[in-house]
Image (spheres, rainbow, N blue to C red):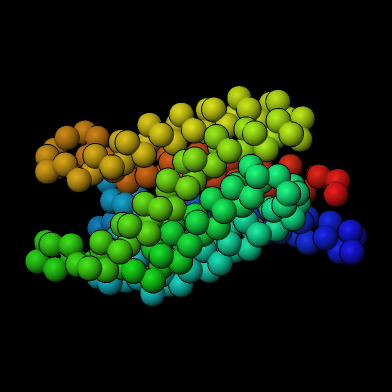
Amino acid sequence: MEVARLYLVKITAIICITICILDIIVLFLAGLYYPGYSQLKMTMSSLGASESPVSEFISAWWIFIGVAFIFFGIVFRKAFGSNHKNVRLASLLLILYGLGEGIGSGVFKADRIAGKMTDSFVMHDIAGGIGVIAALILPLVMKEVMTKENKPGLTLLSQIIFTVGFITMLLFTIRFSSDENNFIVFYKGLWQRIFMLNLYVYFIVISAIMYHKKI
């Protein structure tokens, strides 16, 4: 049983690392098939909107990623010990990220009609917001998990990831400002991608620790 669990943890860690790398590549390539799309100025949600030529593919991809992160969250708990409260909380945050930023973003499209947000757009933002907040809190919880695992180096990384994530999240949420000429609003796509890259670096580090963990 322990051997089977060890293999499950290792395979899940590899899957998470692969998905994090693939997601960056897939979203970049998808933008190339959207005439006029700007990676720096437009949000990733635009790729999944109904008017996007890659809408159905991106929505399906996000749902797939969501399921993968939910699975990752479940196996994470098995890897680090389900009896530890911070491990259970970290596992829950990973699952919420998968549900919100993955499945929620894929199911609900960020559509506008006559310039106004649709109900689907609102649900997309709510689901994505839940996922983003869960991801932002994760490093704070992981600091406690890694203290238990005697990995002090991750404490500093967790602080850096949280700080960068918090700043880029604030810059990205200013997109709701009406001043489209504002530098921060103008490059909303850039802030979102830095937030994602920052988070994925953290996921990859966690996955690497999981892979080398002895159960």
Image quadrant assignment for residue 58: bottom left
Going 40% across and 53% down the picture, which residue do you hit?
Answer: 130
In the displayed orientation, state which residue is furthest to the bottom: 56
Q: Is residue 207 left or right of residue 137?
A: right
Q: Nearer the viewer, residue 156 or 133?
A: 133
Going 43% across and 40% down the picture, which residue do you hit?
Answer: 194
**108 up-or-down from 91: above or below:** below
Going 71% across and 30% down the picture, which residue do you hit?
Answer: 147
Task: Please provide percent x and percent y for residue 185.
Answer: 22, 40
* Residue 22 seen by the camera: no
Q: Nearer the viewer, residue 148 or 20?
A: 148
Task: Please provide percent x and percent y for residue 203.
Answer: 60, 46
**16 up-or-down from 68: above or below:** above
Numbered circles on residues, count: 0
Q: Nearer the viewer, residue 48 or 167?
A: 167
Q: Nearer the viewer, residue 45 or 187?
A: 45
- Locate the N terminus and report the quarter of the image it occupies: bottom right
Task: Please provide percent x and percent y for residue 184.
Answer: 24, 35
Image quadrant assignment for residue 68: bottom right
Task: Please provide percent x and percent y for residue 36.
Answer: 25, 58
Going 49% across and 33% down the picture, which residue do you hit?
Answer: 162
